[in-house]
């Protein structure tokens, strides 16, 4: 087989293998912001939409911190109720950082401290998950 | 004050206000993929790196499902140990969908069913958080 033809087949096979990995070839690439910090807040007054919205407003101030590269604030989605799904919380704060140092900077940042001072009366319980992308 | 000058001041004020909202003006914009599905797996053999890596391999197959718009697979990050941080889990699966229908399609998808069939022997417990961005 001529060298070019062999090379063409190898390249095509590699591309096909790449396609098989994902419907969207980009989503399997390691993120630019591989440290994920996901916080769930349980409200002191779970029935209060006003309290929930106040806390959402507070969480959004955290995007001013320069090491917070992405911020997604959310509430419980109306997906199917299943035993494994925890929908007892009130507000979700999902952040992405470039590295562990960025996450540490966030923890100590005056804007974060101010957030805790001004909004912690609204929550009863917090659970944090810190994830390192692989 | 001349109209142009007034307009310049108004524009500058608006830009300054925009800057005040965030270090990165993009991160406060609502995501294109506002449904977040975050799953934490506790391994049957928490000490087994082989089992953990096998499950990671399994979770990565889920990116082939066309409604999964982003997939971030991860392990516990070595952030500071604090009471609020849950680091007892083994593998994190974080997905973004365009809408609730996309999440429902994922649940019933043959690739997801195949994943459960081939990898569920590795885990002991699963907790799911479904978030709708606000």
Image (cartoon, coloured by chain):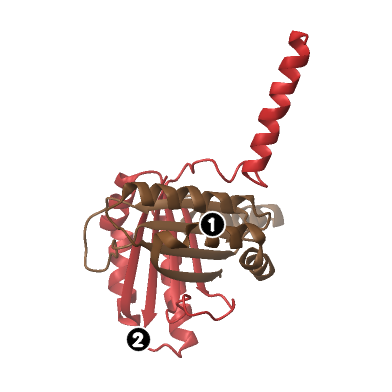
Chain colours: A brown, B red
Q: Quadrant of residue B26?
A: top right
Residue at the image point whose x is 42% and y is 76% from the top = B55
Q: Name the residue nearer the viewer: A76 or A2.
A: A76
- The residue that appears at 70% across and 29% down in the rendered structure is B13
Residue B44 badge? 2
Image location (x, y in percent) of residue B123? 34, 80
- Left or right? Give the position of A102 relative to B129: right
Closer to us: B99 or A36: A36
**Is residue A128 shown above or below A60?**
below
Q: Secondary structure at mark 2?
A: loop
**Is residue B114 visible to the viewer in this orientation of the structure?**
yes
For the N terminus of chain A, the image quarter is: bottom right
> Measured from the top left, where is residue B70 in percent x and y?
48, 53
Above or below for A24 versus B38:
above
Q: Which numbered disc, 2 or 1, marks the residue closer to the eye? A: 2
Decide which of A64, A28 is in the foreground and name it: A64
On residue A18, the disc is 1
Which residue: 74% across, 9% down? B3
The 10 Å Cα crowd at callout 1, few under 14, some 14 to 19, many 20 or more, is few
């Amino acid at each position: 087989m001529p060298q070019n033809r062999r090379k063409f087949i190898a390249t095509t096979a590699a591309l096909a293998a790449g396609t098989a990995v994902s419907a969207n070839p980009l989503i399997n690439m390691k993120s630019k912001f591989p440290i994920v910090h996901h916080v769930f807040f349980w409200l002191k007054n779970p029935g209060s939409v006003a309290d929930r919205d106040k806390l959402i407003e507070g969480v959004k101030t955290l995007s001013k911190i320069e090491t917070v590269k992405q911020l997604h604030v959310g509430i419980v989605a109306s997906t199917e109720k299943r035993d494994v799904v925890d929908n007892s919380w009130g507000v979700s704060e999902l952040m992405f950082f470039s590295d562990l140092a960025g996450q540490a900077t966030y923890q100590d940042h005056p804007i974060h401290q101010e957030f805790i001072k001004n909004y912690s009366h609204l929550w009863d319980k917090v659970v944090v998950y810190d994830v390192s992308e692989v």
